Image (spheres, rainbow, N blue to C red):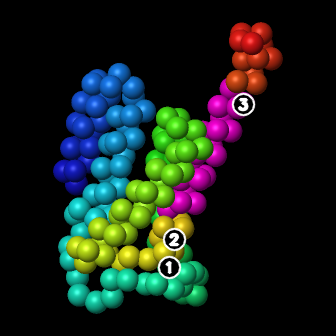
Amino acid sequence: MWYFLLAVVVTIIITVLTKRWTVGVLIGYVLIILGETFLFRKPFEGQHFQSQLFWSYKVWDVQKVQIIANILLFIPMGVLAGCLWKWKGIIVGIVLSVVIELLQLISQRGLCEFDDILHNTLGAFIGVSIYMLVETVVKRKRNNNGLQK
């Protein structure tokens, strides 16, 4: 959709202004997430809030793709947030997820549910963990090669 192009343009502009590619790419990726989860969804009639925690696992056959998609969607965001704020990047995932769920509820453009917050947070945690693991391996390799103390 056209918002992907908008996200790319915003990414480039913010990267140039901040001189930090991670900030620009993170904001661009957040715009894509907001586009997919809220901005370009149409309002619908029906249920907009699911208060039962872990309800999606009771209907795994129907929800498994959605569960996995929510986790995968937040992994790149977690990597980028981890690059900027280390483990505190998980907080970015939690806050973004809560904002999305509240926007979906208020606008009636999705189902506000605790399971999505859990899955999105898990994705952010995996992403931050990936970044932290790679950073640790790279630092150890540099230290072992005598490049840095």
Question: Which quadrant is home to the N terminus?
Answer: bottom left
- Image: 9 above or below 94: above
Determine whether the residue tagged by mark 1 lies in a helix, strand or loop.
helix
Tag 3 near tag 2, CB within 8 Å:
no
Percent x, y of residue 140 = 76, 24
Q: Quadrant of residue 23?
A: top left
Give the number of the disc on residue 146. none
Determine whether the residue tagged by mark 3 lies in a helix, strand or loop.
helix
Q: Is residue 6 magenta?
A: no
Q: Earlier in the sequence, mark 3 or mark 2?
A: 2
Determine whether the residue tagged by mark 2 lies in a helix, strand or loop.
helix
Tag 2 near tag 1, CB within 8 Å:
yes
- Give the residue number, with chain letter if any, for mark 1: 63
Alpha carbon of mark 1 to alpha carbon of mark 3: how far?
A: 36 Å
- Give the residue number, with chain letter if any, for mark 3: 137
Can the viewer see residue 68 in this picture? no
Question: Relative to 73, is 111 on the left or the right?
Answer: left
Q: Where are the magenta residues, as a range?
A: 120-138
Percent x, y of residue 114 = 48, 75
Amino acid type of disc 1? Gln
Residue shown at the point (71%, 12%) measured from the top left: 148
Amino acid type of disc 3? Val
Q: Is residue 121 magenta?
A: yes
Dominant SS type (magenta): helix
- Give the residue number, with chain letter if any, for mark 2: 67
Q: Earlier in the sequence, mark 1 or mark 3?
A: 1
Question: Relative to 1, is 128 on the left or the right?
Answer: right
- Image: 47 above or below 117: below
Alpha carbon of mark 2 to alpha carbon of mark 1: how far?
A: 6 Å
